[in-house]
Amino acid sequence: MALTAAELVKADQDHLIHPLHHPVDNAEPIIYVRGRGATLTDIGGREYIDGLAGLWNVNVGHGRAELAEAAAQQMRELAYFSGYVGSSNVPAIRLAERLLELAYDNMQAVFFTSGGAESNESAFKTARFYWKAVGRPGKVKVIARQNAYHGVTLQAMSATGMAAYWKMFEPRVPGFVHIPTCYPYRYQGARPGETVGQAAARELEEAILREGPDTVAAFIAEPIHGGGGVLYPTDDYFSLVRDACTRHDVLFIADEVITGFCRTGRWFALSHWDVKPDILSFAKGVTSGYLPLGGIMVSKAIKDAMDAVKPEDRWMHAYTYSGHPTCCAVALKNLEIMERERLWENAARMGTRLHEGLRTAFGDHPNAGEVRGGKGLLAALELVADRGTKANFPAGEKVAPRMQAEMFKRGLVTRVRPTSGSHPANGDQVFFAPPLVVTEAEVDRIVSITRDAVKAVLGA
Ligand SMILES: Cc1ncc(COP(=O)(O)O)c(C=O)c1O
C-alpha cells in the first residue's frame, strides 16, 4: 500500500539525508510530485511557481514527455556501457560534437561527468595535468574568488568561496587561493579612477604574482555568480581577467554550470563579453536536470597535450558514468528542444521583464540595496537595513529565510542566501532563475509575490 503523506514525512526525517542536511529544515518537508512548465505541484495538490528552475537547471521546464521518450528509447537500445579506453557510444560522440558547435570556437574536446562538482574536479586535475605535460610541473595552485560556488566535493569545496561550506569539513585541500570578486555593490578595493572591474582584475594579477606565476595552474570563475549572490561583473572585468591569465600562463576555467545552456539569453555567458576560457565546466542545463550529466570542454592546446604524452603519463582521470549513453541521449534531445523553441530568446525577453519588474517594484524601497539582473533569467534582490550605508540586517533577524517562507506561502518557491555579516559582506539575498519557458504572467506574479513578501517581512 502506498505511504500516506504523513508516513512519507516521517520516513524522510528518519532515513533520508538531504543536501546541506539539518533537521530544522525538514520539520515540515514539502514533497513535490509533479511539474509542468514553470509550475510545481506538491503532494497536497498545491501549486507553486518554480522560481529557481529546480536548482537553476530545469531550463526547458518541467514535464517534457519528449525527454522521457528519449531516455526510454536509449535504455531499450543500450542503457549503459563503459566509455573507458577502447569503447565508445553513439550518443556521447554526437553530444560532444554538438556541444563543440554551440560553445566557444576555441573548444576542441569534451569529457563527460555526472554533475557540476565532478566537472570542476576534472577541470582542476586537467589544469595540473596540462602543465605537467608541457614541462611546468610546479604550476598546481588554483585561484578562486570570494562568494564563488563551485560544488562541495573536497576540491570543489576548497574552490568555493563561502566559509559556511568549509566550517565543519576543514582542513581544505591545499593550493586554493581566494581573491575578492567583482561585486560592484560591495567592492572596497578600487583606487581613484579605477572601475570595480579593473580593480578586481588587478587583484587577480597581484595574486598570481604574489603566489608566483610558476606555481599557479588556473583561475576559476562563474561568469555571473550563482549561489554566492547572482553577482554581475562590470562589463570590463572578464576581458581584463582573460588578459591577466594569458600574460602569466594561467588557464582560465569558466564555471558555466549555471550560466550555460541559454540561461543568460545566450548559449554560454562569457560570450556577453567576447571572452573565451581554456576550460569550460558545465552541468545542470545540459539535460535540464532530467538526468544527471556534466562535463568539461577543453581548448585545442589541452587536447593536444593529452594526445601527445606517453601512454604511461596518460590523463588518468575517469568516472564510471562518463559519457553515459542514456544521459547523453537526453542531453541531445534537450538541446534540440532549446534550439527548436529558440529558448535563448524567451530567456532574454522574460529576463528583461523580470529585471525591470523588480526594479520598478523596489526602485525606491528603503531596504532594496540592489536589484541585479538583465542578462537572461538570472536575477537577485539584495535587502539591507539601510540603503544609504549598505548596513545589513543582523543575521538574527533572519530576513532571508523569512522572505523565503513568505514567498512560499504565496506560491513561489526559490532560494535565498542569508547575510554573512556587516558590509562589505553580503546582505540578505533572494534569487530568481525560473525555467526558460516562463510566461509573462508568471514573471509578473513572481514580482508581485516578492513585493508582497517584502511587505510582510519588513512592514513596507
Ligand atoms: C556554478 C556552479 N558550479 C558547480 C556547481 C556544483 O554542481 P553539482 O551540485 O552538480 O555538483 C553548482 C551547483 O549549484 C554551481 O552553481
Image (tube, rainbow, N blue to C red):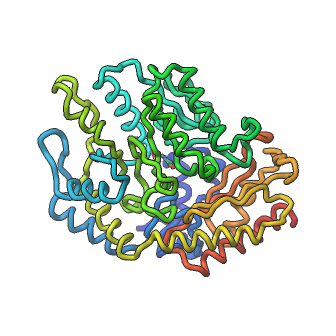
Residue appearing at x 19%, y 30% in the figure: 308
x, y percent for residue 345:
48, 73
Q: Nearer the viewer, residue 137 or 449?
A: 137
From this viewpoint, which residue is outermost toward the left?
86
Viewed as shown, does residue 405 lie left or right of 443? right
Where is the C terminus found, in terms of image quarters? bottom right
Query: Which residue is situated farthest in the front direction here?
Result: 193
Q: Along the line of sight, which residue is nearer the eye, 59 or 74? A: 59
Residue 399: x, y in percent?
Answer: 78, 54
Residue displayed at 55% across by 65% down = 376
Total count of labels: 0
The image position of residue 100, as x and y in percent, is 30, 54
Residue 107 seen in this snapshot:
yes
Quadrant of the image occupied by residue 52 = bottom right
Please tell me in which quadrant of the rendered image residue 357 appears. bottom right
- Quarter of the figure that contains the N terminus: bottom left
**18 displayed left or right of 364:** left
Q: Is residue 164 visible?
A: no
**Residue name at image x 60 percent, y 27 percent:** 206
In percent of width and height, residue 294 lies at 37, 50
